[in-house]
Image (cartoon, grey):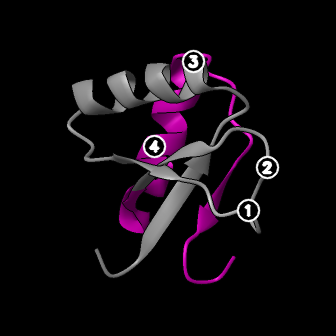
Amino acid sequence: MDDACIAVFPSTHSVIKAEKALLRRGIAVDAVPVPRHISSDCGIGLRFDCAFEKAVRDAIAGENIPISGVYNEKQD
């Protein structure tokens, strides 16, 4: 994954719910530790190819899952 993004959530429950929703839609994600410089909310985030950012945001919004933000792994 050349251009990776990390979706950050306020709770582990939200991470798990989002992961299931994204995998159901065929969007590949990996649960990863969130770097402290990005967030200190929840220690786990979802890493995915930034090319799918809109699809990820749409899926999460469609499931009413709270999200803290999406960050580019290289830039943030």
Contact between marks 4 and 3 (CB within 8 A): the answer is no
- Give me the C-alpha separation between circle 2 and circle 1: 6 Å
Rendered residue at 53%/53% (across/down):
33
> Nearer the N terminus, badge 3 or badge 2?
3
**Residue at numbered disc 2:** 40
Which quadrant, please, contains the N terminus?
Answer: bottom left
> Nearer the N terminus, badge 3 or badge 1?
3
> Which disc is residue 13 wearing?
3
Which structural element holds mark 4?
helix
Relative to residue 4, is residue 30 depicted above or below? above
Q: What residue type is labelled 2?
A: Ser
> Left of 67 or right of it: where is 26?
left
Q: Residues within 10 Å of mark 3 (few under 14, many from 20)?
A: few
- Give me the C-alpha separation between circle 3 and circle 1: 19 Å
Rendered residue at 52%/30% (across/down):
15
Q: What stretch is highlighted in magenta?
A: 48-76
As drawn, the residue found furthest toward the left would be: 26
> Which disc is residue 56 wearing?
4
> Nearer the N terminus, badge 4 or badge 3?
3
> Does the magenta-highlighted stretch encompass residue 68?
yes
> Nearer the N terminus, badge 4 or badge 2?
2
Contact between marks 2 and 1 (CB within 8 A): the answer is yes
